[in-house]
Amino acid sequence: MSLIPERLRVLADFSGRLAGIWGEHDATAAPYLAERRALLQQFQPTATFDILPGAGHWVQYEAHAAFNPLLRDVLKRDS
């Protein structure tokens, strides 16, 4: 049995750029952020994965001043 959840298998065929931006206190991910980073980078080793301190699940709202520049950088990068 694979360690990759079935719902994530679609990423194996995805050719676009992957990136993660998470809130440090995201109730749906903490305390497993390191595992999520590793899983994302199994599919794309160069995928960025940023954790924003003090933010929760709505990181784009709770830490918009830090989130927006990160997202802008992700979108500007070459694929």
Image: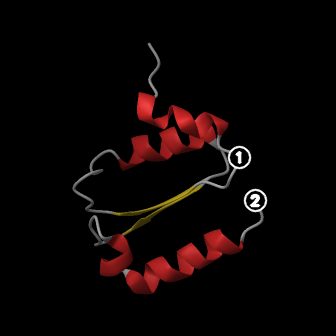
Circle 2 residue: 79
* Image location (x, y in percent) of residue 48: 59, 58
The image quarter containing residue 1 is: top left
Please report contact status of discs 1 and 2: CB closer than 8 Å, yes or no.
yes
Is residue 67 something one can see in this rendering? yes
**Most distant residue in the top direction:** 1
- Looking at the picture, tell me which residue is in the foreground, 60 or 53: 60
**Most distant residue in the bottom direction:** 65
**Which mark is drawn over residue 53?**
none
Q: In this view, does 55 lie above or below 13?
A: below
* Image location (x, y in percent) of residue 66: 45, 81
Work out which quarter of the rendered image holds the C terminus and state it: bottom right
Circle 1 residue: 15
Crowding at dot 2, Cα within 10 Å, few <14 / some 14-19 / many 20+, comes out as few
Given the image, on which type of amino acid does mark 2 rest?
Ser
User: Callout 1: helix, strand or loop?
Assistant: loop
First of labels 1, 2 by sequence position: 1
Given the image, on which type of amino acid does mark 1 rest?
Ser
User: Callout 2: helix, strand or loop?
Assistant: loop
